[in-house]
Image: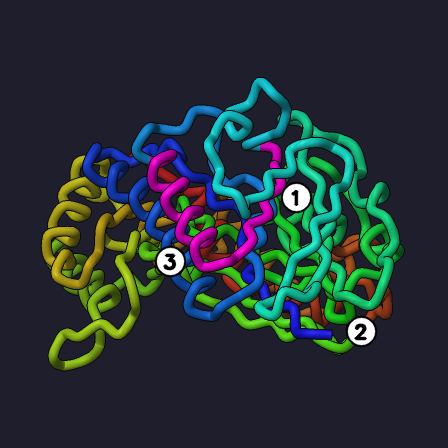
Amino acid sequence: MSMFKFLHIADVHLDTTFLCRRPELRDRLREALRRSFEAAVDCAIEEQVNALLIAGDLFDNDRLSWRTERSLVEQCRRLDAAGITTIYVSGNHDPGGNRYRAVAIPWPGRFRYLGAGEPVIVDVAGRDGELAGRVVGAGHASAREGTNLAARFPRADGPAPHVGLLHTMVSGATGHDAHERYAPCSLDDLRKPGYDYWALGHIHVRQQVCDVSNAYYPGNIQGRHARESGTKGGLLVKLQDGLAPQVAFRRFAPVEWENIRLDKLSDVSSLEGLVRILREALEPEEPDGHDDRAGARMLRVMLSGPSALYNRLGRDAIAELEEELLSALQRHEVLDVEIRLDAVTRPVDLSEFRGQPHLLGEVLSLLEAAEQDPEILAGLVPDQLAGLQDSEDGVRLIYARSLLDGLEREAGSRLLKEKR
């Protein structure tokens, strides 16, 4: 049996409507989605794979721009000319059915679009013309598919490697709680057919669903907002002779989101000083200014903790900081800088409030007593303590004492809060 080699991608979300403030940036990000798919096609051709598998949500909604549709068809024709079979199952953003857009697109001959709810078997030939692998795929028939499609997949039949292709929410997968329960299934549903690999889509976090499973999410191909930070791309997979899948990540995203938290601001007393601190955190460390990170960046900076600038960080000041930083960092391919105030508080000297006859004084006294006296701390700890499963008293007290760290500052910032 020849090796079955394929590229697994999902959640391309072409023509996403970005909510950026600048129209030119929205255009740049939509172009990044098209470029990410083109990079995947380049990889498939260079690696001489047998198939490109697209596990749903190829585009973000049912309305594709003419530019995006033309680019998509051109890339699929490149795959066709290279002798590569493309198999695409619909997802919740691009469901199947005759009234949806994908049905009317002029796909090339080797392209297989699976938009119905029932599983379809596609045999994929190797370079020698012999059977290399068998892909079983099922698409979403509607935008709110609630059926367990995985339960409908037939058992593996024959010696060829079998791959399940599905857009689904697998219970227990990392990030499953951030996604709708479309075509939900369990790991047991994926084990029953006896497939060599499950090419999944829907959850935008790259992962092997379980350390002992052969089910994988590649994550989305290009991040679309700050919650989808880091490197994005697809999975290059090799199946052969009943061995465990050989899975390698390939980066395709030309733009990456990066989140940076700065919380040591207590000594920064001017906006100019804050700009300096921010630039030091955001610019490359190399003396020549070279940035070895591939691609462009979208930056979100979260400021937190006590700051002498507490009363000066209003909306206008933040906007000016963002513009100045963006101008300074554009040579490092930074496309946008967003600054968020995440629990920035005014600096407070708590010593003047200790022992005073008011609420903050009483709270500080109680926290100090709990820190020093185990019996007082034990009286404050509930029977069920969040984050702790062991009910042993000693363990509970150690854990509870760790939660006291930073509570004095938090109490001061909350009880002395004032408007900027």
| Front-lying residue, 1 or 10 | 1
Instruction: Give the spatial CA distance, label 1 vs label 2.
Output: 47 Å
At label 3, the amino acid type is Ala
In the image, residue 410 lies at what x, y percent? 48, 52
What residue is disc 1 on?
167
Tag 2 or tag 1, which sits nearer the N-term? Answer: 1
Q: Is disc 1 surrounded by few (<14), some (14 to 19) or many (20+) residues within 10 Å?
A: many
Q: Is residue 15 above or below residue 301?
A: above
Quadrant in which the C terminus is drawn: top left
At label 2, the amino acid type is Gly
Tag 3 or tag 2, which sits nearer the N-term? Answer: 3
Question: Could you tell me which secondary element the residue under label 3 belongs to?
Answer: helix
* Range of residues picked out in magenta: 68-92
Instruction: Give the spatial CA distance, label 2 vs label 3.
Output: 55 Å
At label 1, the amino acid type is His
Q: In the displayed image of the protein, which residue is found farthest to the top?
A: 99
In the image, residue 87 lies at what x, y percent? 59, 48
Q: Residue at x 86, y 70 (%)?
A: 392
What residue is disc 3 on?
39
Is residue 155 found left or right of 411 in the rendered image? right
